[in-house]
Image (tube, helix red, strand yellow):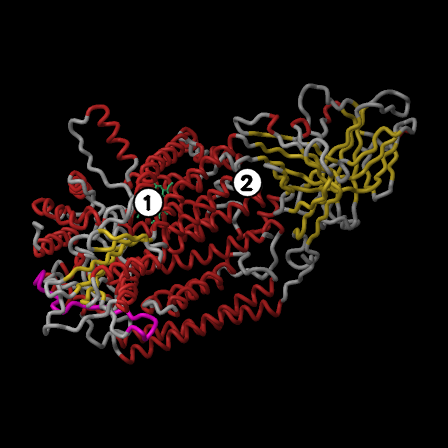
């Protein structure tokens, strides 16, 4: 490593400008998402209510026309392939997915598309901001909380856009996600801002890059899962209320009708959380390997390590709960939220309230503790 | 078939209602009792195609209503064999409390301990129990903070101490939780492994009577003979790496065993990791050694400056090796707000493994320890060691060595002591002992600046010496730090005005002691490096376990275990009726998709027959099937 790899002021300034610009574009996207919801509310959406009230009336007689799914094979050789009939699990509520934030309204849909385009643009700009920051300090951009925050929000948006690109039905996430991304960037720029600087020797290790990059990715995916879980809880109470004959308020109806069915939301968050759990496990192990090299022990119950472990156990709880009768559904969802809360606390809480070897609020100390005195 | 479809539908409905009002939830006993009944009839409650999907499935379903539960059980039997054992997850047991007897109780307790619910509870408790240790200072990490805490909290301090809150992770209650968890884990793994081996050795279960019941279903009529259809189906399934065989009029096939294998591997890997970790702790050793450039170290107990070890460690366990510190290099940020921040620390060593192994060179950096067998040599500190020559009153050299000094601040202002115990004769030829207090600044700021170093590197070194003589009290029986002087029996050297002699030396300068008592020369500066040598056996196992755990986890979470049946029978009109159905352990869009692909494959060889009579495409008067959420695109 070159000793005097001077930080490049120009790049650092460019990075700041890009982050500010990204925030501006995110704000535009935010308003576009709002417009999508507003215009969407004009059309009448009442599919959940329809399905559920029909459900309560004529139990076995509903759905005279069996919904049939035809799956198409890749080729044209199969013209007339047999149809596959799919039935829901017994006892599951049979509710169709909502149409999305636009609520089937064309203009709403247009705003939604604009919002997504703006999100893509903002993502690219923010990505540029993270990249120039990395170039200006000549290392990965996660040496302090400011850098961690801008990277985290960028990755979270990246996860969302990736899901969209995979044609998953997730546009409903947009508004919730962009709101928090704006918050996150705001906090980063005002409270956490740190002038660019290089790392001390203790932080030089390729395990750091592996460990931190996967930690950020896991956090972003967990976050998306948590948003799904919260919406699941709302939608589930909404559906329960309908089933028990209640009439939810107009606002609740307008919002909830447009979201996917609670079962779909639940499945969405399960898939997201389950998919990233092995990576989280790996993140912890990579951290242990790094700690082994840097501090002479793999595991020392440092607060950061402890909370990573707690988060891990909490997600394991969630996965177990889903496999255990009587704990599925809402209870499992609460566990998932607690688990994400642990993740958040590990990130913000531990950095701010607890002192440990990981406190990258003052990285110098960590280095001094491991070398010197 | 005793249950009618409307029965079933109705019972599902009733259960739904229970679920919604919350009365059916949180009372596992109900579900468990019903599951127990299922078990009693020989079919355990595993007839549960959607273990991790729908909000209400599992044994729960059978708990619909007591009156319905028997019939529900028979109904489940229909699917039972076919749907059974898609997982080896343990059944939830009913606490059959009365009339158990001692063995009954033991067995009941064991069942409870190894149930999923208790595993869940223990996991919960483990994460809760881990919290206080992250918020309250821990003696294993920072003793001084614990002392500080005790002083500030007169009431809570002793209370915390009593319940082990200052050493949470070695406290009895924390250990109890994870030991129980691991007993539970082992109790869970062993039977599940047996069960899984059994499943691997047996064939996929035959088709249930009514395929229409299953989550994904397809049917068509064809002119092809049933035997041919089955043959085609068998081939197609095998090509897709299903385990398939013909059972009666249907082909039964299953795929995705890696899910279960992965899950078992993961849980077993957890045990391996824990055992490896515990082993490592018991046989662990850790010691520190400060080495000046040019000096060496051999890994024996006596050579360590300090040393601690695990309970089962013996001195014979130390890996035999030795190394010399050739050179230490430290570089620092030279400008900007972080001036003086360390950039590179690097120790070049020559080491040899075994009693007379070949010498090899290596570099040890902060994040890159030298690994020799189970031992790792870490670079943990560094400082300066001025080289000093002392002559006594007769001009004989009585001391000629590098003296390591301890850094006081981040700019490596250092302090220490030089002790000459034997061989020194003062100006009048009398035996005496010398003690010299030393301060060292790698970068002296010049006249008029404070006596602290301005920068951590050696750019303008100064050695400040204050000599004393008299009794060093090194034989007083009290252990003495090499870095400090016990001045109680020492007298300072005084100059002609009676002032204590004290001098700032540059490299190469000599200070003369008054009254011909000798001289002290500052010859140069060497650097020293502090090494921590830890030896922890079992790390390889822990790492192997961790990697297995991740691989197993990925298998267990990403692989679907599912079954497919293809039934071909001759219909009343002589035309073959093909029925296909798929069942996944979790309700997934992939199962119907895969079924569709398979159907298409078979369909090419057994195409749809011309429709003989108008209108009756539905072969069975089943209740209309409804779409599952996941299946929609
Ligand atoms: C040391 C603590 C444990 C951890 C961290 C842990 C972790 C996990 C994880 C992450 C899964 C998810 C895999 C999946 O959904 O397929 C899982 C599944 C499972 N675990 Fe554990 N586990 C632990 C202890 C136990 C114990 C004590 C038992 C036995 C009672 C157990 C039984 C199971 C079973 C049966 C499954 C599969 C569930 C299914 O088939 O759907 N685990 N475990």
- Residue B200 is labelled as 1
Q: Residues within 10 Å of mark 1 (few under 14, many from 20)?
A: few
Is B435 placed above or below B558 here? above
Q: Residue B479 sits in which quadrant?
A: top right
Residue A62 lies in the magenta stretch: yes
Frontmost residue, A274 versus A80: A80
Residue B455: x, y in percent? 71, 50
Q: CA distance from mark 2 to mark 1?
A: 41 Å
Residue B514 lies in the magenta stretch: no
Residue A205: x, y in percent? 59, 52
- The reply to whether the residue tagged 1 has its Cβ within 8 angstroms of ligand 1 is no
Frontmost residue, A339 versus B364: B364
The residue where tag 2 is placed is: A297
Look at the magenta stretch and give its main secondary structure: loop
Does residue B220 appear in this view? yes
Quadrant in which the C terminus of chain B is drawn: bottom left
């Amino acid at each position: 490593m070159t000793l005097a790899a001077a930080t490049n002021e120009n790049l650092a300034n460019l990075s700041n400008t890009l982050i500010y610009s990204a925030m501006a574009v995110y704000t535009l996207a935010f308003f576009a998402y709002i417009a999508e919801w507003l215009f969407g509310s004009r059309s009448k959406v009442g599919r959940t209510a329809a399905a559920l009230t029909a459900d309560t009336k004529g139990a076995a007689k509903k759905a005279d026309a069996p919904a049939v799914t035809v799956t198409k094979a890749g080729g044209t050789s199969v013209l007339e392939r047999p149809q596959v009939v799919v039935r829901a699990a017994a006892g599951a509520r049979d509710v169709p997915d909502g149409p999305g934030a636009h609520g089937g309204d064309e203009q709403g849909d247009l705003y939604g598309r604009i919002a997504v385009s703006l999100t893509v643009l903002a993502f690219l700009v923010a990505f540029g901001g993270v990249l120039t920051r990395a170039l200006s300090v000549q290392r990965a951009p996660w040496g302090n909380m400011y850098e961690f925050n801008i990277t985290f929000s960028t990755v979270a948006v990246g996860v969302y856009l990736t899901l969209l690109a995979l044609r998953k039905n997730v546009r409903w996430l947009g508004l919730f996600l962009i709101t928090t991304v704006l918050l996150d960037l705001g906090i980063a720029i005002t409270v956490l801002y740190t002038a660019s600087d290089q790392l001390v020797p203790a932080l030089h290790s390729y395990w750091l890059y592996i460990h931190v990059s996967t930690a950020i990715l896991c956090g972003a995916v967990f976050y998306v899962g948590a948003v799904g879980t919260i919406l699941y809880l709302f939608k589930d109470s909404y559906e329960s209320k309908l089933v028990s004959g209640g009439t939810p308020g107009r606002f609740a109806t307008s919002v909830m009708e447009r979201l996917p069915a609670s079962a779909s939301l639940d499945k969405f968050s399960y898939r997201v959380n389950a998919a990233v759990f092995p990576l989280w496990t790996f993140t912890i192990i990579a951290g242990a390997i790094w700690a082994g090299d840097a501090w002479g022990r793999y595991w020392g119950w440092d607060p950061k390590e402890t909370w990573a472990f707690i988060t891990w156990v909490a997600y394991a709880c969630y996965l177990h709960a889903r496999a255990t009768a009587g704990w599925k559904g809402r209870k499992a969802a609460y566990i998932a939220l607690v688990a994400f809360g642990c993740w958040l606390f590990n990130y913000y809480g531990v950095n701010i309230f607890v002192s440990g070897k990981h406190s990258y609020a003052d990285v110098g100390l960590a280095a001094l503790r491991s070398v010197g005195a | 078939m005793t249950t009618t479809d409307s029965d079933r539908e109705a019972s599902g409905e009733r259960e739904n209602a229970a679920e919604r009002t919350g009365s059916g939830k949180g009372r596992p006993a109900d579900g468990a009792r019903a599951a127990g009944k299922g078990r009693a009839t020989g079919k355990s409650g595993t007839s549960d195609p959607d273990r991790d999907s729908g909000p209400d499935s599992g044994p729960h379903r059978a708990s619909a209503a007591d009156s319905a539960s028997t019939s529900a059980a028979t109904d489940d039997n229909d699917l039972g064999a076919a749907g059974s054992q898609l997982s080896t997850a343990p059944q939830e047991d009913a606490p059959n409390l009365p009339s158990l007897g001692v063995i009954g109780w033991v067995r009941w307790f064991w069942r409870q301990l190894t149930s999923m619910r208790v595993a869940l509870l223990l996991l919960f408790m483990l994460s809760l129990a881990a919290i206080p240790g992250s918020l309250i200072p821990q003696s294993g990490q920072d003793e001084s903070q614990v002392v500080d805490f005790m002083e500030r909290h007169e009431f809570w301090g002793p209370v915390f101490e009593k319940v082990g809150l200052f050493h949470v992770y070695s406290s009895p209650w924390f250990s109890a939780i994870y030991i129980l968890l691991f007993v539970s884990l082992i109790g869970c793994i062993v039977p599940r492994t047996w069960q899984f081996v059994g499943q691997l050795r047996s064939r996929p279960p035959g088709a249930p009577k009514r395929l229409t019941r299953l989550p994904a279903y397809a049917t068509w009529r064809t002119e092809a003979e049933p035997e041919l259809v089955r043959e085609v189906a068998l081939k197609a399934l095998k090509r897709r790496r299903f385990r398939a065989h013909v059972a009666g009029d249907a082909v039964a096939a299953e795929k995705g065993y890696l899910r279960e294998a992965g899950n078992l591997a993961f849980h077993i890997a957890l045990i391996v990791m824990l055992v490896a970790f515990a082993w490592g702790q018991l046989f662990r050793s850790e010691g520190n050694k400060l080495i000046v450039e040019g000096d060496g170290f051999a890994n024996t107990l006596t050579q360590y400056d300090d040393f601690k070890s695990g309970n089962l460690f013996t001195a014979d366990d130390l890996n035999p090796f030795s190394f010399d510190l050739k050179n230490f290099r430290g570089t620092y940020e030279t400008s900007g707000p972080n001036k003086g921040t360390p950039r590179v620390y690097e120790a070049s060593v020559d080491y040899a493994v075994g009693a007379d192994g070949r010498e090899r060179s290596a570099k040890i950096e902060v994040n890159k320890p030298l690994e020799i067998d189970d031992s790792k040599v870490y670079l943990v500190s560094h400082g300066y060691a001025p080289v000093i020559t002392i002559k006594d009153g007769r001009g004989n050299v009585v001391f000629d060595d590098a003296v390591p000094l301890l850094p006081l601040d981040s700019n490596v202002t250092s302090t220490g002591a030089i002790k000459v115990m034997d061989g020194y004769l003062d100006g009048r030829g009398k035996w005496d002992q010398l003690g010299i207090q030393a301060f060292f600044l790698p970068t002296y700021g010049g006249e008029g600046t404070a006596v602290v170093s301005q920068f951590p590197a050696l750019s303008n070194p100064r050695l400040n010496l204050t000599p004393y003589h008299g009794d060093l009290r090194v034989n007083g029986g009290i252990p003495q730090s090499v870095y400090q002087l016990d001045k109680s029996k020492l007298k300072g050297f005084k100059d002609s005005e009676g002032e204590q002699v004290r001098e700032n030396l540059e490299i190469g300068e000599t200070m003369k002691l008054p009254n011909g008592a000798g001289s002290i020369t500052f010859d140069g500066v060497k650097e020293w490096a502090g090494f921590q040598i830890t030896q922890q056996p079992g790390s390889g196992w822990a790492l192997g376990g961790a990697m297995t755990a991740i691989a197993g986890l990925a298998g267990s979470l990403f692989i679907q275990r599912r079954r497919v049946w293809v039934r071909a029978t001759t219909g009343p009109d002589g035309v073959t009726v093909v029925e296909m159905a798929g069942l996944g352990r979790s309700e997934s869009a992939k199962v119907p998709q895969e079924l569709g692909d398979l159907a298409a494959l078979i369909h090419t060889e057994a195409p749809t027959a011309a429709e003989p009579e108008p209108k009756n495409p539905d072969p069975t008067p089943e209740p209309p099937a409804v779409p599952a959420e996941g299946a929609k695109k």
